[in-house]
Image: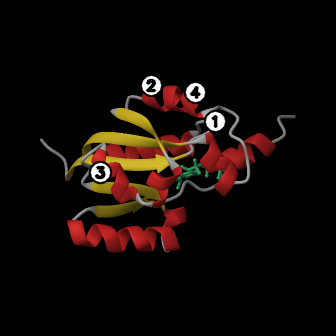
């Protein structure tokens, strides 16, 4: 039986893959036939998160591409992350997914206005509490 959406897109840095990322991918895949992931560049992470990823963009692409919940993945430029309509030239997605930490942000409000015109939905899934790449890298193991 086909799902609610045909092709879904989500984007992110996804450095040091963790269960919060997996929850997002698995939630996405429950509602779309094909899940496409846009991997943000190292330059994006340095500019917006003020940190160089532990795994570079090619390594992160390889790791995310290997997941069974992910149908395809590619690296997205900073311009494409800021204006997600640009990604439509590479992939005709009909829904954009994100973790709920982005809900209410200026970037997504702008994207929502753009997508309302062309009939693309935005769906937020609950951000998994208590885990992030930043926390993991700061965590002491003993
Ligand atoms: N995400 C999530 N739950 C988490 C962590 C991330 O749902 N616990 C989602 C985010 O909402 C986003 C995507 O995963 O849609 C990519 O998030 P990213 O910023 O790469 O992950 P973080 O672990 O939050 O990274 P950082 O600590 O570097 O900000």
Q: CA distance from mark 4 to mark 1?
A: 10 Å
Can you identify the residue that label 3 sits on? 88
Name the residue that disc number 1 marks: 16
Q: Return the residue found at the far left.
A: 1
* In the image: residue 103, left or right of residue 47: left
Q: Nearer the viewer, mark 4 or mark 3?
A: 3
Mark 2 and mark 3: Cα distance apart in space = 23 Å
Circle 3 packing at 10 Å, graded few (<14), some (14-19), many (20+), is few
Q: Residues within 10 Å of mark 1 (few under 14, many from 20)?
A: some
The mark lying in front, picked from 4 and 1, is 4
Colour scheme: secondary structure
From what the image shows, is residue 44 above or below residue 22? below
Dot 3: what SS?
A: helix
Q: Position of residue 4 (x, y in %)?
A: 19, 53
What is the quadrant of the N terminus in the image? top left
Cβ atoms at labels 1 and 3 below 8 Å apart: no
- Distance from the alpha carbon under mark 2 to that under mark 4: 11 Å
Q: Is residue 38 above or below residue 86?
A: above
Return the residue nearer the eye: 94 or 27. Answer: 94
In the rendered structure, find residue 66 and report the number of the disc placed on it: 2
Q: Secondary structure at mark 2?
A: loop
- Which residue lies under the disc numbered 4? 59
């Amino acid at each position: 039986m086909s799902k609610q959406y045909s092709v879904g897109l989500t984007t992110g840095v996804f450095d040091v893959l963790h269960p919060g990322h997996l929850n997002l991918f698995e939630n996405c895949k429950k509602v779309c036939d094909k899940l496409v992931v846009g991997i943000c560049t190292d330059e994006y992470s340095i500019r917006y998160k003020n940190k160089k990823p532990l795994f570079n963009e090619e390594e992160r692409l390889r790791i995310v591409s290997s997941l069974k919940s992910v149908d395809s993945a590619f690296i997205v430029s900073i311009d494409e992350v800021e204006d997600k309509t640009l990604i439509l030239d590479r992939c005709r997605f009909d829904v954009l997914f994100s973790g709920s930490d982005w809900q209410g942000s200026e970037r997504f409000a702008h994207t929502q206005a753009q997508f309302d015109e062309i009939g693309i939905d935005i769906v937020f899934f609950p951000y998994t509490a208590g885990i992030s790449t930043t926390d993991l890298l700061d965590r002491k193991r003993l």
